Image (cartoon, rainbow, N blue to C red):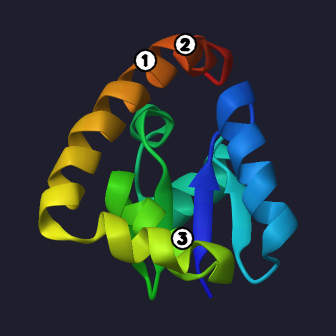
Amino acid sequence: MIKVLFNDSCSICSKEINHYKSIDNNIIWIDINNLKVSYKLTGKSHKELLRRLHVVKDGKVYSGVRAFAIMWLHIPKYKWLARLVSLPFIYHISILLYEIIAFFLYLKNKHQLNEKR
């Protein structure tokens, strides 16, 4: 079983994760804004967690595109996407696109860092 750490306060992030939640119940979904739990699981700061999606699998923390691929592998309907994104050329393009999108989502939600102090 994997744990997915996501920003439930981000309207875009939560909408996507709620879609995945509706499909699969074998994943533990954790809001990064529960700082005690998210830090204990990952050792990462709120800023780091706010910047990318994270997955904990077998005690190891993955982030970004790799985290999405792991999550999709655990959702039968999305296994094909995990395999596609794992292809070398597509993986590198996906990282670039993900980082651009994640950066703008981070800017959109950066205010949360001040709220959680």
Residue at figure coordinates x 80%, y 51% from the top left: 18
Above or below: residue 108 compared with residue 65? above
Q: Secondary structure at mark 1?
A: helix
Determine the image quadrant of residue 102.
top left
Determine the image quadrant of residue 19.
bottom right
In the picture, the quarter occupied by the N terminus is: bottom right
Q: Which amino acid is tagged 2?
A: Lys
Side of 28 where 58 appears, left or right: left
Residue at figure coordinates x 47%, y 81% from the top left: 57
Residue at the right extreme of this rendering = 22
The residue under label 2 is 108
The residue under label 1 is 104
Instruction: Count the marks.
Output: 3
Q: Which amino acid is tagged 1?
A: Phe
The residue under label 3 is 71
Residue 72 versus residue 48: which sits nearer the camera?
A: 72
Q: Are marks 2 and 1 in contact (CB under 8 Å)?
A: yes
Which comes sooner in the sequence, label 1 or label 3?
3
